[in-house]
Image: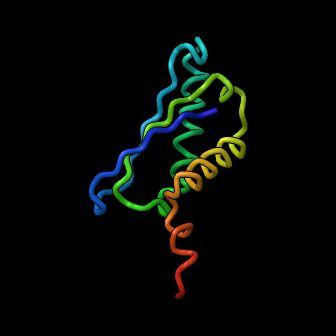
Amino acid sequence: MLVVDQRLTTNNQRPKFAFIISKKIHRRATKRNRAKRLLSEAVRIFLPQIQGGINGVFLARKSIIGKEFWEIKSEIERIFKKANLLKNEKTSALPN
């Protein structure tokens, strides 16, 4: 559903993400805009948990059209965990 690229910058910057949904995904702009809104909302939920200094790009595939929010959110969470970007994923092994 998604392809992701990430770049590290300085740690004191807030994480930033861009979303690319080309016209090849769907010819109607309303469908592409809805997918982009769902993606940005799903990422917004995880922003407080993401370590600083990350710039990321999400490139959507055709399968994103028609997906529900919870499906996109779980895919975003899976991507962030796989890339080890969530703060509590790294710090969970450390003693308090």
| Residue at the limit of the structure toward the bottom, as seen here | 96
State how the image is colored.
rainbow
Residue 4 is situated, as x and y percent measured from the top left of the image, at: 50, 38
Q: Residue at x 48, y 62 (%)?
A: 48
Q: Residue at x 45, y 39 (%)?
A: 5
The answer to which of 16 and 56 lies nearer the viewer is 56
Quadrant of the rendered image containing residue 71? top right
Q: Residue at x 42, y 44 (%)?
A: 6
The total number of labels drawn is 0
Q: Is 9 rendered above or below residue 28?
A: below
The answer to which of 34 and 3 lies nearer the viewer is 3
Q: Is 95 rendered above or below residue 48?
A: below
Q: Residue at x 72, y 38 (%)?
A: 68
Q: Is 57 rendered above or below residue 11?
A: above
Pick the quarter of the image with the N terminus: top right
Quadrant of the rendered image containing residue 28? top right
Residue 41 is situated, as x and y percent measured from the top left of the image, at: 55, 45
The answer to which of 94 and 12 lies nearer the viewer is 94
Residue 34 is situated, as x and y percent measured from the top left of the image, at: 59, 30
Residue 38 is situated, as x and y percent measured from the top left of the image, at: 59, 39
Q: Is 21 rendered above or below residue 10?
A: above
The answer to which of 75 and 33 lies nearer the viewer is 75
Q: Is residue 6 left or right of residue 59?
A: left
